[in-house]
Image: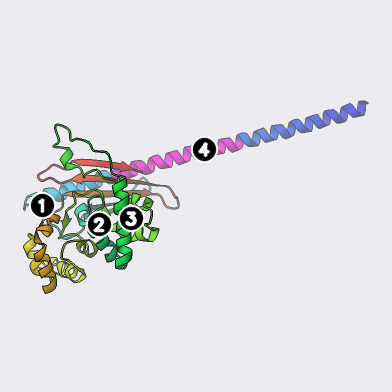
């Protein structure tokens, strides 16, 4: 009996040690988990503030560009980037920022079926596939239109904002049934939700130019060739720059061409990415700054991710 008691006591002590060790291990794991969570939170905060710093620097660069242009008139540029891309390091965080003319892209919420099909053709899809993709986008867009909202009494600021539509961001195109990852990757660089729907003939790349009435692949090449010498100032100059067949098509649809085109930027699409080397974490900001003329540069939208 005494031996049995000693054996039982020893077993109880051993179990107590096992339980204590397990609790200690769990506590250690919990502490390490909390430390990782805290470290990630600190890293995310650093990235977020670095991205905001990159946004501030980009907006100041844009203001300086506008101030310089105001001395000579409107901001006329033949580069999609309104100011050069900026890469800086803030608190050991690599920050890249671009300021792009939103009118150099096709407005995803306002583009017609034919314009969407033309874009998909321009990025390498056959006519049938391009029209299938355009149908999928147009159908999804019609099903997801936001409810109608009357403009406020004072709509001066509202007019500066890009129109609300089914797509709040180009990235939402990935959710459209029938649009593959490859189709999204091909078209996304040429799409925006941040413009007023006009295409800037001085900054739009060939794929976007081909969505305009009367401009095909040969016509887009001619537009690029002509604007390298000097920017376009009127749609009539564009028509004259086209090949003969394209010129005739454009003249037949001149009213549409005039209604769809512009020659100076209006909305600047600012994109900032902040990341540290060797880390999967990143902070991103997309902002829209409107250039209505003069010294003002209202920022009408900021989205952080």
Label 4, secondary structure: give it.
helix
Among the 4 quarters of the image, the one containing residue 30: top right
SS assignment for the magenta stretch, majority: helix
- Looking at marks 2 and 3 on the same chain, the residue that comes earlier in the sequence is marked by 2
Q: Residues within 10 Å of mark 2 (few under 14, many from 20)?
A: some
Q: Residues within 10 Å of mark 1 (few under 14, many from 20)?
A: some
Over which residues does the magenta segment extend?
Answer: 28-53
Residue 96 shown left or right of residue 226 in the figure: right
For residue 69, which numbered disc appears in the image?
Answer: 1
Mark-to-mark CA distance, 2 and 1? 36 Å
Mark-to-mark CA distance, 2 and 3? 10 Å
- Residue that protrudes farthest toward the right in the picture: 1
- Looking at marks 2 and 1 on the same chain, the residue that comes earlier in the sequence is marked by 1
Residue 88 shown left or right of residue 2 in the figure: left
Whether the residues at callouts 4 and 3 have beta carbons within 8 Å, the answer is no
Residue 49, image x and y in percent? 34, 41
Mark-to-mark CA distance, 4 and 1? 51 Å
Q: Which residue is mark 3?
A: 136
Residue 122, image x and y in percent? 27, 65
Say if the magenta span includes residue 88. Answer: no
Q: Is residue 221 above or below residue 97?
A: below
Among the 4 quarters of the image, the one containing residue 292: top left
Q: Nearer the viewer, mark 2 or mark 4?
A: 2
For residue 113, which numbered disc appears in the image?
Answer: 2
Question: How is this picture coloured?
Answer: rainbow
- Looking at marks 4 and 1 on the same chain, the residue that comes earlier in the sequence is marked by 4
């Amino acid at each position: 009996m005494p031996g049995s008691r000693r054996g039982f006591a020893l077993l109880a002590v051993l179990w107590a040690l096992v339980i204590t060790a397990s609790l200690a291990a769990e506590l250690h794991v919990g502490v390490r988990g909390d430390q990782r969570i805290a470290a990630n939170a600190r890293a995310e905060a650093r990235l977020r503030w670095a991205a905001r710093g990159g946004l501030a620097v980009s907006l100041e660069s844009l203001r300086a560009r506008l101030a310089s242009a105001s001395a000579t008139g409107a901001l006329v540029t033949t580069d999609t980037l309104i100011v050069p891309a900026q890469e800086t390091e803030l608190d050991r965080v690599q920050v890249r920022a671009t300021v792009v003319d939103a009118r150099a892209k096709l407005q995803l919420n306002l583009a017609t079926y034919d314009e969407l099909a033309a874009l998909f053709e321009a990025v390498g899809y056959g006519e049938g596939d391009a029209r299938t993709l355009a149908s999928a986008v147009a159908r999804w867009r019609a099903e997801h239109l936001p409810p109608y909202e009357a403009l406020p009494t004072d709509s001066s600021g509202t007019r500066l904002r890009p129109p609300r539509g089914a797509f709040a961001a180009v990235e939402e195109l990935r959710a459209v049934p029938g649009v593959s990852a490859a189709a999204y990757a091909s078209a996304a660089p040429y799409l925006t939700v941040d413009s007023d729907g006009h295409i800037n003939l001085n900054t739009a790349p060939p794929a976007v130019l081909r969505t305009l009435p009367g401009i095909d692949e040969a016509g887009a090449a001619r537009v690029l060739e002509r604007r390298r010498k000097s920017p376009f100032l009127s749609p009539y100059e564009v028509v004259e720059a086209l090949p003969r067949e394209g010129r005739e098509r454009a003249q037949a649809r001149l009213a549409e061409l005039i209604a769809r085109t512009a020659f100076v930027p209006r909305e600047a699409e600012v994109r900032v990415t902040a990341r540290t080397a060797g880390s999967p974490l990143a902070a991103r900001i997309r902002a829209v700054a409107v250039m209505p003329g003069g010294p003002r540069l209202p920022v009408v939208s900021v989205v952080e991710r």
